[in-house]
């Protein structure tokens, strides 16, 4: 039953109704006393009426005060806390509010099982739903940033695993990707021997057939040291796909605690969204490779080589460290083309490129500089060191016989070397130019030779 509202305040309405009840009680009470046996001449007097009216008003007032004292503080607490949330939501960064929000500060005490208690507990549930929705929003924002800011497959995979482990119950994870017919470990954290997972049937099923698996391990089964450093409770094998193409698989394991809803949702969302981001990253790396490599020899092309030389020279001149460039040119290469055809010439170029590549140390690079001309950048090598390496290369090429059917084709190279800072040049183009002069000298003085620029100028 709804009692009509008299004012805009429920508490004021309550007060007015209690006063009305007081008036009615004050009017009825003398008649009740007559019915009970009191003499009418004593109780049906205006003085007695006045007295009962006053008593009725006092009872009405006390009842209003009691209700105000019992109910009002709870409602007030609820309204203040709700105002706090509203303020927190309006602020730009809800993060501050949620960080400050502890049980004492934000939650309501549930002190009764009536509507007031139900409101308090509904408020608490709403608050925790709001905080967890906000946490999820933050997490997905971070994930979107990771996806949009990382175009490298490796960085993207590593950062996704970092985020997954830091924000869910997942404690170890590995991302395996399918590339050039092989499954490779792209990023891993907390998984022992991730490489062995590439042969596991469940993993192969995920990669080849897109089959997801969730394995719950009973508590008594100890898998210590097999998959992770800890005892996993659940292992997820989730295929990573893009438009039906299987790109790879994410393997994730929870630690002591089972995966909660947030972990499940996050894991699935990450895996689903990663398909697109990884596909973009793979395309990007293919383009990068195409842009940096020479199609015939699969070594760096001139464009990439020049950019790299600029960087290396900049570092060497800043740190005053050694850097040598070596120009290698095949002798009378035109004859090979003329005598055996261009296809054989191409194979000969490929052979020379692979010999050069195999001779170099880690960190040194070989570039196809022109048709049958190669450039090598040797970091930390003096001109003397570079000449020694060049001499080995010259000898090895001279010693290698290139078989074409029945025929055996011999090749030689001429090499020009220039080293910084022995030859004190101001930029990398000048350094190259000096090596080119040394090469020219090698050609002019009979070919199949190594010439150092420094020796030239002496
Ligand atoms: N097959 C093949 N030949 C190429 C390629 N690039 C350049 N050449 C050939 O390499 C030859 C280079 O000839 P030249 O510059 O005259 O030099 P060379 O015959 O090696 O003589 P020297 O350098 O003076 O010892 C030319 O015949 C080019 O056509 C290539 O990618 N494939």
Image: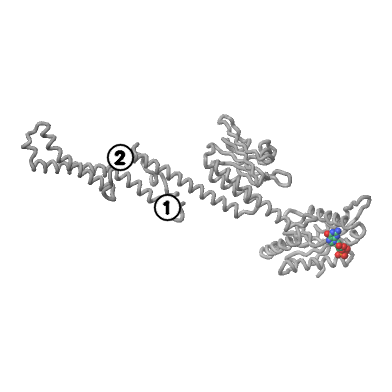
Image-based side of 222 in relation to 61, left or right:
right
Task: Report helix, strand or loop for mark 2.
Answer: loop
Query: Which quarter shows the N terminus?
Result: top left
Image-based side of 116 in relation to 39, left or right:
right
How far apart marks 2 and 1 lie (CA) works out to: 38 Å
Q: Count neighbours of disc 1 (C-alpha within 10 A) and say few if under 14, some if 14 to 19, many if 20 or more.
A: some
Marks 2 and 1 in Cβ contact (< 8 Å): no
Query: Which quarter shows the C terminus?
Result: bottom right
Does ligand 1 reach within 8 Å of label 2's beta carbon?
Answer: no
Q: Is residue 196 visible?
A: no
| Residue 46, image x, y percentages | 8, 43
- Between residues 312 and 455, which one lies in front from this camera angle? 312
Task: Report helix, strand or loop for mark 1.
Answer: helix
> Mark 2 or mark 1, which is nearer to you?
2
| Residue 254, image x, y percentages | 56, 39
Q: Is residue 251 above or below residue 360?
A: above
Does ligand 1 reach within 8 Å of label 1's beta carbon?
Answer: no
Q: Count neighbours of disc 2 (C-alpha within 10 A) and say few if under 14, some if 14 to 19, many if 20 or more.
A: few
| Residue 379, image x, y percentages | 73, 59
Residue tagged 2: 1
| Residue 359, image x, y percentages | 79, 54
Q: How many marks?
A: 2
Q: Is residue 403 visible?
A: yes
The label number, if any, that marks residue 76 in the structure image: none
Image-based side of 149 in relation to 440, left or right:
left
Which residue shows up at 42% across the image and 49% down it?
Answer: 100
The label number, if any, that marks residue 88 in the structure image: 1
Report ligand 1 position as a quadrant. bottom right
First along the sequence among labels 2 and 1: 2
Q: Is residue 364 above or below residue 130?
A: below
Q: Is residue 456 above or below residue 199?
A: below
Q: Residue furthest top?
A: 220
């Amino acid at each position: 039953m709804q009692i009509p509202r008299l004012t805009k305040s429920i508490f004021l309405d309550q007060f007015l109704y209690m006063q009305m009840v007081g008036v009615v009680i004050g009017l009825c009470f003398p008649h009740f006393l007559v019915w009970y046996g009191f003499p009418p001449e004593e109780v049906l007097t205006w003085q007695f009426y006045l007295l009962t009216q006053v008593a009725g008003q006092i009872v009405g007032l006390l009842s209003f005060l009691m209700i105000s004292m019992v109910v009002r503080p709870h409602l007030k607490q609820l309204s203040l806390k709700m105002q706090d949330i509203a303020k927190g939501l309006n602020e730009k960064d809800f993060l501050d509010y949620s960080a400050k929000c502890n049980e004492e500060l934000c939650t309501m005490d549930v002190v009764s099982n009536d509507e007031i208690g139900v409101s308090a507990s509904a408020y608490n549930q709403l608050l925790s739903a709001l905080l967890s929705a906000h946490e999820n929003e933050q997490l997905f924002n971070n994930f979107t940033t990771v996806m949009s800011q990382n175009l490298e497959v490796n960085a993207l995979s590593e950062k996704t695993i970092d985020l997954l482990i830091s924000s869910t119950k997942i404690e170890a994870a590995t991302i395996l990707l399918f590339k050039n017919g092989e499954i490779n470990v792209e990023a891993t954290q907390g998984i022992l021997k991730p490489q062995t997972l590439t042969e596991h049937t469940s993993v192969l099923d995920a990669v080849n057939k897109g089959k997801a698996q969730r394995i719950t391990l009973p508590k008594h089964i100890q898998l210590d040291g097999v998959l992770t450093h800890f005892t996993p409770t659940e292992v997820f094998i989730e295929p990573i796909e893009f438009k039906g193409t299987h790109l790879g698989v994410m393997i994730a394991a929870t630690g002591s605690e089972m995966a909660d809803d947030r972990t499940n949702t996050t894991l699935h969302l990450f895996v689903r969204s990663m398909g697109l981001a990884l596909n973009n990253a793979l395309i990007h790396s293919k383009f990068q490779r195409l842009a940096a490599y020479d199609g015939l020899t699969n070594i760096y092309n001139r464009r990439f080589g020049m950019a790299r030389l600029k960087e290396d020279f900049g570092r060497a001149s800043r740190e005053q460290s050694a850097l040598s460039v070596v120009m290698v040119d095949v002798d009378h290469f035109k004859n090979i083309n003329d005598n055996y055809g261009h296809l054989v010439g191409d194979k000969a170029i490929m052979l020379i490129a692979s010999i050069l590549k195999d001779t170099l140390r880690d960190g040194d690079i070989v570039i196809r500089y022109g048709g049958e001309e190669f450039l090598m950048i040797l970091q930390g090598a003096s001109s003397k060191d570079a000449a020694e390496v060049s001499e080995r290369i010259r000898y090895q090429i001279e010693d290698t016989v290139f078989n074409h059917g029945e025929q055996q084709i011999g090749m030689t190279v001429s090499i020009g070397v220039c080293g910084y800072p022995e030859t004190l040049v101001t930029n990398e183009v000048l350094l190259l130019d000096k090596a080119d002069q040394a090469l020219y000298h090698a050609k002019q003085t009979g070919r199949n030779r190594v010439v150092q620029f420094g020796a030239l100028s002496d």
